[in-house]
Amino acid sequence: MSASSPPPTHVIRPTRVEVSLGQIAANLAAIRAHVGPARVMAILKANAYGHGLMPVARHLVAHGVEALGAAFLEEGIHLREAGITVPILVLGSLAGEQIPRFLEHDLTLTASSVEKLQWIEQAAEAARKRATVHLKIDTGMERVGIHYYHADRLLEASLRCRHVDVTGIYSHFAQADAADLGSAQEQLERFLTVLDFYERRSLPMPVRHIANSGGILQLPASHLDLVRPGILLYGYYPSAECRRTFSVRPALSWRSQVCYFKVVPAGTAVGYGGTWTSDRPARLVTVPVGYGDGYFRALSHRAHVLIRGRRYPVVGRISMDQLVVNIGWDTAYNGDVVTLIGQDGEENLTADELADWAGTISYEVLTNINTRVPRLFVN
Ligand SMILES: *Cc1c(COP(=O)(O)O)cnc(C)c1O
């Protein structure tokens, strides 16, 4: 083999993410059973929360999901180019120069202000196309959207558009995963008050949606016409305090393999900075995964992994591409599976646990798994 030829395609890094598409479909079914007759818009931003955009999208569409939600235009284009035809709403805020691309790919735009709606109207007229739009109302998140107390201006402006079809209207909760639902209830009431606009004028109501995973779990009144689950689809609850009114299970496992075994005497310092020192003779194994894969460096000295169905601590600082595990005086061999997230025998590690150790939330643990880690899909 010449030095420049690429590695054979069947050689895969021992580090991989396994995604159970069947479990994602089961989570979708659990959500449906809870929210029906409301429809489901599956939220697929950030590479489907790290699970792999395209296979997850295809699987959800095959299981009848009515719509998809993406953060950015490029995710929407990617889905369209792969042949996905269900409505795709781009949730993130709109830059004017992007509008022709939305129209070209029949992606649903978010109109979050009168000005942006006017850009859309003008661009659609110029392109001789119809734009499909959801109006975005800010009821308390203070991120993107017209304030609920000025929303009539946007709704009225939408009635004057000649090249725009308003097929939906939405808002977003800031605290629907909290134990105290006062804030979420207030946001919901503000949203419903905005929607009175259509009834007062006897106009047809666009599709109304506000519920994220927290709203789906805790606030049935928020389900309205459509719900927007993200984290729940992937089998996690949005927060520790959020009520778990039905059950979902994680779909993602993250595994690697032992790539080096050694025995060290007491007093051996391990890794950059020598921040951990063995206090007795120990067997250490090296695993070819690190913060360059998205295994946070902040997990150093905190995380545990599973080998042969047992939990062992990560010792020393996590490097970019490697970490070291102390297996005490137990046995492990090169090639043994190392589980970073997932089940091994009786033991289980969740993204919630990693999140606690790293001082973050499961969302960030999952979306942070770098694309250099191959995804394997099982059903
Ligand atoms: C991310 C997002 C969701 C999904 O949130 P989860 O908490 O993961 O269910 C829903 N709606 C909008 C607008 C979002 O940005």
Image (cartoon, rainbow, N blue to C red):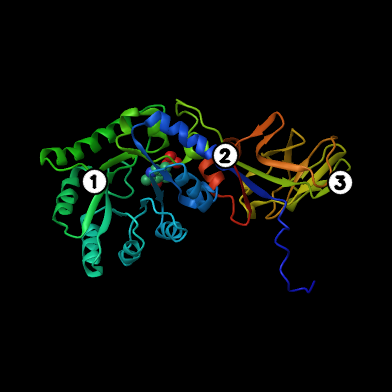
- At label 2, the amino acid type is Ala
Where does the N terminus fall, quadrant-wise?
bottom right
Q: Quadrant of residue 22?
A: top right
Q: Is residue 272 above or below residue 250?
A: below
- Which callout, 2 or 1, points at the residue further toward the start of the chain? 1
- Judging depth in this view, the residue of 220 and 27 nearest the camera is 27
- Pointers 1 and 3 in contact (C-beta within 8 Å): no
- Judging depth in this view, the residue of 47 and 128 nearest the camera is 128
User: In the visual, does 168 lie left or right of 265?
Assistant: left
Residue drawn at the location 45% of the way across and 46% of the way down: 61
- At label 1, the amino acid type is His
From mark 1 to mark 3, how far is it between C-alphas? 61 Å
User: In the visual, does 298 lie left or right of 272?
Assistant: left
Q: Residue 148, image x and y in percent?
A: 22, 43
User: In the visual, does 180 lie left or right of 63?
Assistant: left
- At label 3, the amino acid type is Lys
Q: Residue 280, image x and y in percent?
A: 86, 36
- Which callout, 2 or 3, points at the residue further toward the start of the chain? 2
> Where residue 147 is drawn, which disc sits there?
1
Instruction: Quickly name the residue at label 2.
Output: 251
From mark 2 to mark 1, how far is it between C-alphas? 37 Å
Q: Secondary structure at mark 3?
A: strand
Residue 176 showing in the rendered view = no
Where does the C terminus fall, quadrant-wise?
top right
Instruction: Quickly name the residue at label 3.
Output: 262
Q: Quadrant of residue 330?
A: top right
Q: Residue 193, image x and y in percent?
A: 19, 36
